[in-house]
Image (cartoon, rainbow, N blue to C red):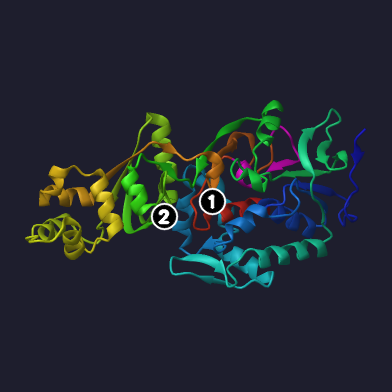
Amino acid sequence: MPTKTPASKPAQNGKTAMVIGAGPAGLMAAERLAGDGYAVTIFEGMPSAGRKLLMAGKSGLNITHSEDLETFLTRYGTSRARLEPHLRKFGPNQIREWCEGLGVETFVGSSGRVFPTAMKASPLLRAWLRRLDGLGCTIHYRHYWTGWNDADQAVFRTPDGEVTATADITILALGGGSWKRLGSDGKWMEILTNAGIKCNPFKPANCGFEINWTDHLIDKCAGSPVKAVTLTCGDQTVRGEFVISKTGIEGSAVYAISATLRDQWLETGVGTLTLDLSPDRNLDDVTKRLSKPRGKNSMGNHLRKTLGLDATKTALIFEVTPRETLNDPTALATAIKNLTLHIKKPRPIDEAISTAGGVAWEELDDNFQLINRPGTYCLGEMVDWEAPTGGYLLSGCFLSGCL
């Protein structure tokens, strides 16, 4: 027979809450509920909290973004209407104030992204867990949620056997479908679907894409960044940099345009990306510079001297441009300003930074509560919304926990 997990400390308001999932959305919900007087118990399937947060912070934890709020709101695409009222109440400024309340100072980087001064996620997470402990929250690790039993109790698989729990409010914050080794395995989708809750299939978000590179390009450029470039897919254009990988392309500028490129590929079976390798020069200027006599210079040296293109950009041009184009300055200028890459497919979901898909918006009220299961809420990446890297994804997770 399953045992019942011990409750947390007594509630000040006489009510209990269980939070399933100890990532950013779940921990934020636990903090707010405990602050409102609930007795909060957190259940986490992994041996420790915030594993994906810690992994994301290895190269610097990008908490949010400092751009003006109106621009910030545009980053949430088709989910903006559902998120905007709440982002106006708990947006980038409030997130920075919350960090400061934990004793974690933040700063704005050159790109406008906001980071802790220590850069890493671990100091913030440690301070956060101390606050939750001070608020009376109890955390049970290695408690993997497997659904509800016939008595409508939450059931957890643990090293010591099956346990159950009940509460006045249940928060589901189980993550998306990527980075399974960190706990976000997406298996909860089958549980909710079987309970009659509509979930949209997972899709990779903030992901890389496969391209059939030649062995020559892989040997020469795999791991090399392509900087100062604009990428266009459909009606979306972004400026930044990306990296050539052995399998294709990845990096911040690719992630920023990945939703548009992925959806184009899903709808048509073809994904086309256009690069401008010289975004600070117009076509006439590029053409004029390329029309200068080459003399004894190789084409690579000619491109470097006339346009300042480095070896990686030059290798990309040689990879996808016909030889006859290379010998025609006008055609070459057009190719440099509109270099077309054809993607094979997105990289696998488990490699993606995040996922689209999840609990359908129509299943939730304005506060992320399941309409057909009052008292149960779905937060964070479980819900079918997505945002690019740059602090937007994490901001959305913090926000949903605040509700």
Left or right of 337 on screen, residue 250: right
Residue bounds of the magenta highlight: 371-383
Q: Residue placed at 58% from the left, 43% from the top? A: 178
Q: Position of residue 111 (x, y in %)?
A: 43, 65
Residue 377, magenta (yes or no): yes
Mark 1 vs mark 2: which is more N-terminal?
1
Q: In the image, which is nearer the foreground, mark 1 or mark 2?
A: 2
User: What's under tag 2, amino acid-wise?
Assistant: Gly
User: What's under tag 1, amino acid-wise?
Assistant: Glu
Mark drawn on residue 223: 2
Q: Is residue 24 visible?
A: no
Q: Position of residue 122 (x, y in %)?
A: 66, 64
- Picture quadrant where residue 262 is located: top left
Where disc 2 sits, the SS reads loop
- Figure check: 352 above or below 195: below
Q: Position of residue 362 (x, y in %)?
A: 59, 34
| Residue of label 1 | 84
**What separation in Å lies between label 1 and label 2 (alpha carbons)?**
38 Å
- Picture quadrant where residue 342 is located: top left
Tag 1–tag 2 contact (CB < 8 Å):
no
- Figure check: 170 above or below 147: below
Residue 330, magenta (yes or no): no
Q: Residue placed at 67% from the left, 30% from the top? A: 190
Left or right of 7 on screen, residue 403: left
Q: Is residue 132 visible?
A: yes
Q: Residue placed at 57% from the left, 39% from the top? A: 384
Q: Residue placed at 28% from the left, 55% from the top? A: 313
In this orientation, which residue lies closer to the viewer: 3 or 83? 3
